[in-house]
Image (cartoon, rainbow, N blue to C red):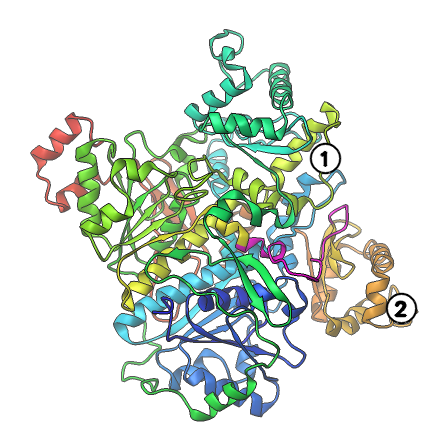
Amino acid sequence: MKGPLEGLLVLDLSTTLTSATVSGFLADFGAAVIAIEPPGGSPLRSQPAFPFWGRGKRSIVLDLDVPDDAEVARALAAGADIVIETFRPGVVERFGLGYDDLAPTNSRLVYVSVTAFGRTGELAGVKGYEGLVMARLGGHDQLGVIVDRPGPAFCAPPFGAWSGAQTALHGVLAALYERERSGLGQRVDTTLVQGFAAHDTWNVMIHHIANQYPEAFTQAGLADEGASLPNNSLFFRLLVALSADGRWLQFSQTTPRLFEAFMRALGLEWMFDDPQWKSVPDFDDLDQRMEYYELLLAAVRSKTAAEWQEVFDREPDVWAEIFRHGGELLDHPQMVHDRAVVTVDDAGLGSVRQPATLAHLGATPGVIDRSAPVLDEHGVEIRALADAGPSTGRARDDAPSGSRLATPPLEGVTVIELGTYFAAPYGATLLTDLGARVIKVEQLDGDPIRHIIPFPEVGAVKVLQGKECVAVDIHAEEGREIVGELVRHADAILVGFRAGVVERLGLDPVSLLAINPDLVYLSAPGYGVDGPCGHRPAFAPTIGAGAGLAMRNLGESAPSGADLDVEVVKPAALRIAQAAMAVAHADGFSALAVATSLLLGLVARQRGAPGQAMRTSMLRTMSHVLVEDMVEYDGSPTRQTGDAELHGLSARYRLYETADAWVFLAAPAPSEWDALTEVLRPHVDLASDARFADEGARAEHDDALAEVLADVFRTQGADTWEEQMLARDVGCLRVRPGTPDRQLFRDGLGAEKGWITEVPHPTFGSVPRLMPLVEFSRSTTRARSSALCGAHTDAVLTELGYDPDRIDALRTAGVIL
C-alpha cells in the first residue's frame, strides 16, 4: 500500500477549514482527493497554511450553480468512496448533490456532512463561522479571563473547526470499517458544536455535584475576579512563572511524586516537615497562600530558562515548557527528533516547511509527496474521469443503503487501554460510543484522574464512559501475563505512558505484536516514544504552552520581559495559565486525534494491512491544530491576527458591545457587504462612505470601520441585533454568558438538539453525559456510563479462562483489585 487508504476516491465539495482538514488527512494517508473549487478558487488559498491544507490533492473548478458543472460533480460522486460537504442544510440538495441524490447510484458511498449547529432547529441556517460557534457556546465569554478590559475575548484558534473535522473523520473511518463487512456505505453527520464538546474534561460533573449538594460545595474559578491569588492548589502544581531572563515557563507536576521533585528543585522541600507549611500546596488561609505563591515565583525567577534546562536535565521528574510563539513549535527538539516536520517542494513557492502526518504508521505510513495544486490544475483529467463513468461495482446492491443496522459500526472490536488521565484515554472512550469494547487496565489504586478533584471519581466520569475497568499491577509478572492474554484476543491496544515504560515492562510493540501479529498498537504519549522529551511529564497546560496555544490566544497582550514587577507577574501568570486551558485545550485536541488514529489503524487492517506499531503525540497533534502558524516558506503571507484588546480579526469579524451585552459579527466575505450595509442603513450609511467603497478601501480603513460599527452596535440590544442580522442572512449572534458546558448542559442547547442523555453511575446515581458526537444513517451508536476501579476484573479474568481459585490467589498476592 502507498498508504492505508490507497485506492479510495474522495470528493471534497466544500472550501472550509473543516472540510480541508478532513480531506487533507485522507490525502496524507493515500486517498485520491479531488477538491472542487468555485470560480476564483477556495478562500483558503489566500492563507499561509494553504500548502498544508491542499497538499496531495487534485483541483478542479466547478460552479455548482451551473447545471453542467453540477452534473460533473454528480458523475464524480457516482464513483467516489467518500464525499465531504460542510455547507449549510439544504445547499447541496439544491445542487442535486445530497446523500439521497447520490446513494441510489452508489450504494458504497460514505457521505459526511458537517454543519455548525446541526441540520434542524433555529440555528440550522446560521452561517458556520468559527466565531459564531464560540459566541453561541460561551467560548468568547469564558476567554474573557485573559483580558484586562471588561467583556469577552476573541477565541483565535480553530477550536470548533478542527474538532469538528476530527469527529467527521471518526464517522468516516468507522463507516469505512463497517463497509468492509457489509459492502454498504452510509451517511455520517456531525457538527462543530459536537466536536468542540470533547474539550470539557470534568466541568459538567463538577457542576452536577455542586448542584446536588448546594450547601456542601461552593464553585470557584481559578482566582476571584480581580484577584491575583489562585483558588485552586492545582495551579501550584501546574505553575506558570517567569524566569530570570523573562521567559514564561509552564511547569508540569500534578502527581505527588512529581510535585515533591519540583519542591526539591525549588529548594522548598523543607516545607513538607514544617508544621506551618506541611499542607503544601493546599492552604485555606489566604495570606499564607499568597506568601507561598510569592515564594514559588521568586524561586523560579532565581534562574534563567537555560539554567532551568540544566535542572531538567538532572531531574527527569521536574519539567517545564517555555511558552512558545508562532511557528517555534517546528523547532521543538522532540518534533525534530520524531521527524514530525517535513519539507515539501512547491513549484511556485519553493521549499515549504510544515507538519508531517498526524500519526505515523510503521507498516503503512502516510506519504506526503505533492504540494497543493494550482487552481484547476487537474480540471481536464478530472472531467475526463467524470465522462468515463464510475468503476465497476458501484451500482446499488440489493440491500437498501437506507436500512438501519441494529449494531454500531465497531461492534466486535476490542481495544485494550494502558494510559492515565485524559489525552489518550478519552480517545478510546470515543470508540466505545461507536461500539468498540474498551478494556481499561489501570493501577490498583485507580487512574490518578479519579482523584484529581477533591471529590473522588468526579474527574474521571467522562473519560471512563463505556469502558470495562480492570485493576492490575502490571509491574508484577503475573499482571503482565494478564495483559498478554488480553492482547491475544484484542484488535488494538492504546498506550499513553512516557518513553521507556513499556520497554521496561515488556509491553512494547515488538513484544505484543509477537503475541498477536494482527494487533494495532498505538502509542500516544505527550511527547514521544523516545527522544529528548519522551520521558517528560506532559499535561494539557504543558503541551498548550510548548506548542503555542496559549500565546495564540493571548496575541500581543501577554506582558513579557525580565524586569516585570512581581505585582505584574502574579495576575499575568493567572491570565497566561488560563489562555491555554480556559476554552479548549491540548488534552481535548489530542484525545480526538487518538480516536482518529486508532480508527485509521483498524481500517488499514480491514483493508489488508498487517498489525503494526503506530504513534502520535499531544505535541504532534497541536502542530496540526495550530497549523496556520506552522507553515513556512519564502514570501508566505502573514496570518491575520487580532487587535491588541482581543476583539477579533477585523471590523467585520469581531466582538462588539451592544446596549446590554456583546455580539459577534461575522460578515468578512465581499459578498456579505451589501446585506450588512442594508441592516445598518437606519443607523449609518456605509454604502456612501468613500472609505468603504470597495474591498481594498475597507481593508485600508478597517480600524475606522471598526470604530463606526462599535458606535452603531451600542445603539441597540444584543438580541435585537441578532434578530435583524440573521433575518438578512448576516452572521451575528449574541455572546452567551458562562462556559460551553453550561450552554450545552444547563442552558438548553444540548437538550434542544437531543445531544444530552442521563446514565446511571455507581457513586452518583444518574449523571448527565453527551450523546455520541457522530450520527449514522444505518449504524447505531451507544451512550454508556463509567465504572469504578476494578469493577470488571473478575468478569474479564473469567472470560480469559482464570478460575475462581486463581483469581482469589492473584487478589491475595496484590496483583489485582
Quadrant location of the N terminus in the rendered image: bottom left
Left/right of residue 399 with respect to residue 734 in the rendered view: left
What amino acid is labelled 1 in the image? Answer: Ser
What is the magenta segment's predominant secondary structure?
A: loop
Location of residue 106 with respect to 531 vertically, above or below:
below
Tell me the residue at 85%/60% (across/down): 705
Q: Say whether residue 493 is visible.
A: yes
In this figure, which residue is indicated by the disc labeled 2?
A: 685
Residue 576 percent location from the top left of the image: 64, 37
Residue 98, numbered label: none
Q: Nearer the viewer, residue 484 or 690?
A: 484
Q: Is residue 638 magenta?
A: yes
Badge 2 marks a residue whose secondary structure is loop
Is residue 176 inside the magenta stretch? no
Is residue 121 visible in the rendered structure shown here? Answer: no
Residue at the image position 49 percent from the left and 72 percent from the top: 84
* Residue 325 sits in quarter: top right
Point out the frontmost of discs 2 and 1.
1
Q: Are marks 2 and 1 in contact (CB under 8 Å)?
A: no
Mark number, residue 560: 1
Callout 1 crowding tier (Cα within 10 Å): few <14, some 14–19, many ≥20: some
Residue 343, image x, y percentages: 54, 60
Using the image, determine if residue 161 lies above or below residue 661: below
| Residue occupying image coordinates x 29% and y 33% | 443
Q: Residue furthest top?
A: 275
Q: CA distance from mark 2 to mark 1?
A: 42 Å
Specify start and end residues of the magenta stretch as a single range. 624-646
Using the rendered view, name the quadrant where residue 526 is placed: top left
